[in-house]
Image (cartoon, rainbow, N blue to C red):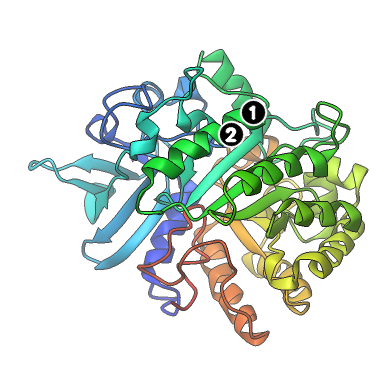
Amino acid sequence: MQRHSQVPREAVIKEDLLRGGIAFDESALSDSANEASGDIKPKSYFIFSFDHGTLPELGEAALRRPPEEIVLTGGPYELRRTVVSVRVNPSSPYRVAADADGLLGLYLDGQRISDVGLPPMPDYYRHKLANGKSVMEVAPTIQWGYLVYLTVFRVCQYFGAKEECQYCDINHNWRQHKAAGRPYTGVKPVEEVLEALEIIDKYDTAKTSTAYTLTGGAVTSTIGGKDEADFYGQYAKAIEERFPGRWIGKVVAQALPKADVQRFHDYGVRIYHPNYEVWDPYLFERYCPGKERYVGRDEWHRRILDSAEVFGPRNVIPNFVAGVEMAEPFGFKTVDEAIDSTVEGLRYFMAQGITPRFTTWCPEPTTPLGKANPLGAPLEYHVRLLQEYRATMEEFGLSSPPGYGPAGPGNAVFSVSSFMDSLPA
C-alpha cells in the first residue's frame, strides 16, 4: 500500500485475498449444506471451483458451505465497501472469524484488519423449480446479486492434457461435484433456465439483478446438433423473448467467426466476451493448447477485432487470466517482464476501443499450473497491473466497460478481480 499509494488500499487487500484465498472459522460458515435454507447466501461453484483445495481437502467448509462473497468495511485501514469472491484456502494467513461479541472480521496473522459482511440469502433462492431443482443450481447470482450467472454447459470439449487450458478446472469441478453427490447439471435445458429466471424476476423486487451471463465450456463440435453460436444463442433468444429488456445479455464464448458473432447479436446478446486468456504468444501456445490448435492466437485476435464491427468496440470485453504470465515452468521470471507483456496486450486492444477485463488467477490444485504454482503470482504483479490498467485506459480515453455495475472503490460489485474497484467512480 505504501509503495503503490495510487492504487486503492481496498484493491490491494482484495487482490491478495483473490490470489491466495481465505480460511474460514466454523463460526463463519453456513449452518447447512442445503442451499435454500439459512440466512446467508452460500457459495454456488458457478463455473470453476475457485478454491485452493479439492472438496475433500476443505474440511468443514465443504460440508457447511462458505458464503458466495464477503464484503469488507472499516478496520484500521478504514476500508470502503469492498466485495470479494470467496476462494477457500484453509492454510491462508487471512481468516474470517467471529469475535467475542459474535461480529465477523477478517484477520491477518491474528490481527483484525476489517469488518466482514455476508450476503443475505435472496428470496428467490428459497424457491425451487417444478422438478425440485434449486434456483442456485440453475441460475445462481454473483457480484452481490448484480449478475445472473448461467453456466449452461458445465464441461468443456477441450479435454485432456493436450487441449485443456492449463489453469482451468472446469472439467474437474464438474467431476468433484458429481462425486460428492451434489446436483450439478451438465447441460441446462432452456426451459429450466427460463423457469429459474421467472422465479428471480418475481422475487427480486428491488431489481438488483441487472445482467445475465451465458457461458460454459468451449464447443468444438456440437451439442444436440447445435454449434457453439447456436447452442449458447438459443438461450439468449429464449430469454429475450420471455423477458425483453429485463437484463443486459452477455455471452462468454470462444472467438468465433464474424458470421457466428452476428448470430449472437441477432439472438439478443449485447455484450460479447471472447476471452484471450494470456497475451504472450509463447505462453498462449503452451497454456491454451486447445485454443491454439483449433483457432490459433493470431486468428483469435483477428476475430476479437472483427466482433467489434458487430457489437461495437465498447461492447466487446475479452477477459484474460491475470497472473498466469508468471506461472512456472514457462512464465516470465520477473514482474517487470510480465507487466510489460500484459500491457502490450492491453494497448493492442484499447487502441481499437476494446476494453479487456481480467480475472485474478486462482491456482486451483487440480490444474497443471495450480500444482506447479500453489502460491500463484506475487501480489506485486497484481497491484502493478491495476496501476497500469487504469493508466492505459486513461491514455486511450476509455471508461469502465458496461455490464459490470458501478466502478470505483466503495462502489464496485465485480468480485473476481479488483479492476472495477481501481477505476474512477
Q: Position of residue 286 (x, y in %)?
A: 82, 46
Q: Position of residue 398 (x, y in %)?
A: 63, 80
> How many discs appear?
2
> Label 1: how many residues lie within 10 Å, few (<14), some (14-19) or many (20+)?
some
Q: Quadrant of the C terminus?
A: bottom left
Q: Is residue 376 above or below residue 1?
A: above
- Left or right of 287: which side holds 410? left
Q: Which residue is mark 2?
A: 193
In the rendered structure, which amino acid carries the disc numbered 1? Answer: Lys
The residue located at (38%, 75%) in the rendering is 2
- Residue 141: which numbered mark, if any? none
What SS does tag 1 mark?
loop
The residue located at (65%, 34%) in the rendering is 152
Query: Looking at the image, do the residues carrying marks 1 and 2 touch, with CB atoms under 8 Å apart?
Result: yes
In the rendered structure, which amino acid carries the disc numbered 2? Answer: Val
C-alpha distance separating marks 1 and 2: 7 Å
> Which is more toward the observer, 278 or 313?
313
Q: Quadrant of the N terminus?
A: bottom left
Q: Which residue is mark 1?
A: 188
> Which is more toward the observer, 20 or 295?
295
Q: Residue furthest left?
A: 101
